[in-house]
Image: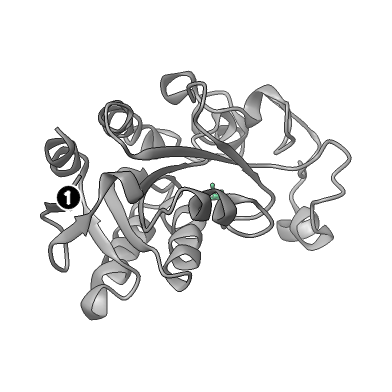
Amino acid sequence: MAKLKLAAKPYEYEFEPKKTALIIIDMQRDFLEPGGFAESLGDDVSQLRRAIEPIKNVLEAARSSEVLIIHTREGHRPDLSDAPPAKIIRGHAKVKIGDMGPMGRILVRGEPGHDIIEELYPQKGEPIIDKPGKGSFYQTDLELILHNRDIKSLIICGVTTEVCVHTTMREGNDRGYECLLLQDCVASYFPEFHKTTLEITRAQGGIFGWVSDSNTLVKALA
Ligand code: TIU
């Protein structure tokens, strides 16, 4: 299939679906669900939940296209051997990574809170990247998977805009991928950080890539 074009900032984004991956970052129960770890810390999960429906629309469109769908989760081995001590002690929090939270051990693989929310649950054949850090490339096989599929473009959704989403976008941009953020498919507990991150992305001629939205992408894929 030829290249598709869609309206974006700072200018039109072109991509070939067969050479594109949709990466859905960390849509995990502990970050998004009422009663999860984030809410127990006082974070307003409604700020994040507004991205669920737009991501669902994009995911459905991608599933009927040639786009490769990849999901990520932030978390660690149960023995925490892959969790940097600096990450564990950061913030002097009372409840640390590996401690028991409302949905199992915090940021530990295999625990209910670490898993992806029901609404966006991965289907068979959609790779899941378990990552120990904020970026999806660091200490994962994401780059190998993208290389093996000859992927050139990354369309990025998920949470949170300025943390795991943007770390991944920056890592991808430096590796030569053409990265697109969908502004209604990313979200932050801090609306001002979200807004500024979108502005940073498209500033200086698209210093980290492009910004568009779910409807525009769904129409382009249809
Ligand atoms: N996925 C992701 O962004 N992990 C975070 O730790 N985000 C926060 O905003 N804390």
> What residue did someone put label 1 on?
2
Quadrant placement of the N terminus:
top left
Residue at 29% over, 59% down:
195
Q: Secondary structure at mark 1?
A: loop
- Residue farthest to the top? 118
Percent position (x, y) of residue 77? Answer: 80, 40
Residue 2 vs residue 6, the one in the foreground: 2
**Hey, which quadrant is residue 59 in on the image?**
top left
From the viewer's side, name the closer residue of 185 and 36: 185
Residue 125 vertical placement versus 144 (above, below): above
Q: Is residue 116 visible?
A: yes
Quadrant placement of the C terminus: top left
Q: Position of residue 119 (x, y in %)?
A: 41, 20
Can residue 136 be seen in the rendering of this structure?
A: no
Tell me what residue is drawn at x 75 percent, y 43 percent.
Answer: 76
Q: Position of residue 197 (x, y in %)?
A: 35, 63
Can you give x and y, in whole percent of width and height, for residue 167 in the image?
Answer: 50, 62
Q: Which residue does the image show at 66% across and 22% down from the upper left?
A: 112
